[in-house]
Image (cartoon, rainbow, N blue to C red):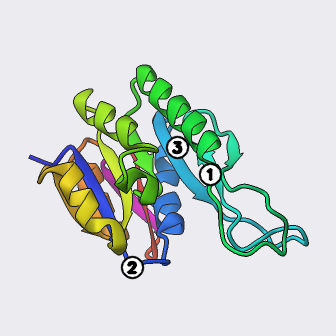
Amino acid sequence: MTSPFAAVVYADGIYPDRLLRQVLAPLRDAGVTLAGVLQVEQLPADDCHPCDMLLEEQAGGEIVAISENRGKHARGCRLDIGVLAELAEAVQSSLLDEPRLLVVNKFGKIEADGGGLREAIADAVALGIPVLVGVPMRNLDSWRAFAGGLATELAADADALGRWLAGHGLRGIAAIDAREPQWAM
């Protein structure tokens, strides 16, 4: 049996957002209902700071800035905890729409400390919704304590993700390009 949730384990600072988007795009294109959040790549702009982060809420497509805007010359990054809490509530509410998959871009410091999207992850598992979560190496011990041995740990690899998704009825289909496997229901 495939585990109810999986961690896409990655080196600190090497986010697998492009990989997750690549693997999930065909599911979205096929009309599969998704919930959760994925980081959005930003185009460089004059007023952007390297810490600025945008997340796309998967159920509705809303783009949300989760970093405090402290100006382009600010030192240090600040996550806007209030915005993250609102986003977590939206993700949790979207679970009522019975998505086929919950995806969370990162089990970050806030989740490791017991907040953020942690409750949505637990609720999805309790509802039988498969969960795919990016986990940086620095938070792997916290993730393991939270998952309690129920989660699979996957390499940041399209084939590994595809096999896990297939185990939840989200089967792979022929690749358009050998470097970009496509996945669907």
Q: Looking at the image, is mark 1 or mark 3 earlier in the sequence?
A: 3
Which SS does the magenta portion mostly show? strand
Q: Which region shows up in magenta?
A: 170-176
Q: Quadrant of residue 97?
A: top left
On whether residue 171 falls in the magenta region, the answer is yes
**Do the residues under discs 1 and 3 have CB atoms within 8 angstroms?**
no
The image position of residue 19, as x and y in percent, is 47, 67
Q: Residue at x 25, y 48 (%)?
A: 5
Q: Looking at the image, is mark 2 or mark 3 earlier in the sequence?
A: 2
Kindly state the secondary structure of the residue where label 3 is placed.
Answer: helix
**Do the residues under discs 2 and 3 have CB atoms within 8 angstroms?**
no
Q: Select label 2 or label 3 by which is in front.
A: 2
Position of 177 with respect to 150 (left or right) is: right
What numbered label is drawn on residue 28? 3
Nearest to the observer: residue 123 or residue 171: 123
The image position of residue 142, as x and y in percent, is 27, 60
Kindly state the secondary structure of the residue where label 1 is placed.
Answer: strand
